[in-house]
Image (cartoon, rainbow, N blue to C red):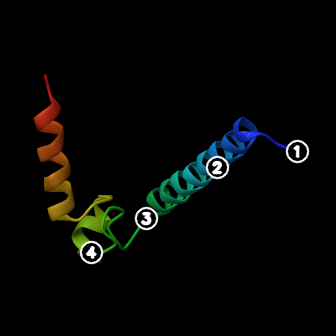
Amino acid sequence: MPDEVDLANDLIDIEVRRALSKHHQHRDVAVMGSTTCLECGDDMPKERQKLGFKFCVPCASESERRKSLYAE
């Protein structure tokens, strides 16, 4: 019979596999080109898609703002 540690390890394994799968799906979409923002899922303008951007303007702006908060 599995103990609590075995059950916890199984749960961790499941969550890690799920997260990696989600990451690989996002990476594949980004490589192939996406018509939607990878952050919020909204449609992106064709010009941003052609230039290879992965995020819409509001999400890209928010990402840059968060980065600046933690910059040294």
Q: Amino acid at mark 3?
A: Gly
Name the residue that disc number 3 marks. Answer: 33
Q: Which residue is mark 1?
A: 1
**In the image, which is nearer the foreground, mark 3 or mark 1?**
1
Element under disc 1: loop
Q: Position of residue 44 (x, y in %)?
A: 26, 73
Which mark's residue is nearer the viewer, 2 or 4?
2
Going from N to C along the chain, the mark reached first, 3 or 1, is: 1
Instruction: Indicate whether 32 appears above or below 10.
Output: below
Q: Secondary structure at mark 4?
A: helix
Residue 13 in the image: x percent, y percent?
67, 44
Check disc 4 and report the residue beneath it: 46
Q: CA distance from mark 2 to mark 4?
A: 33 Å
Q: Is residue 18 left or right of residue 36?
A: right
Q: CA distance from mark 1 to mark 2?
A: 24 Å
Which is more N-terminal, label 4 or label 2? 2
Q: Secondary structure at mark 3?
A: loop
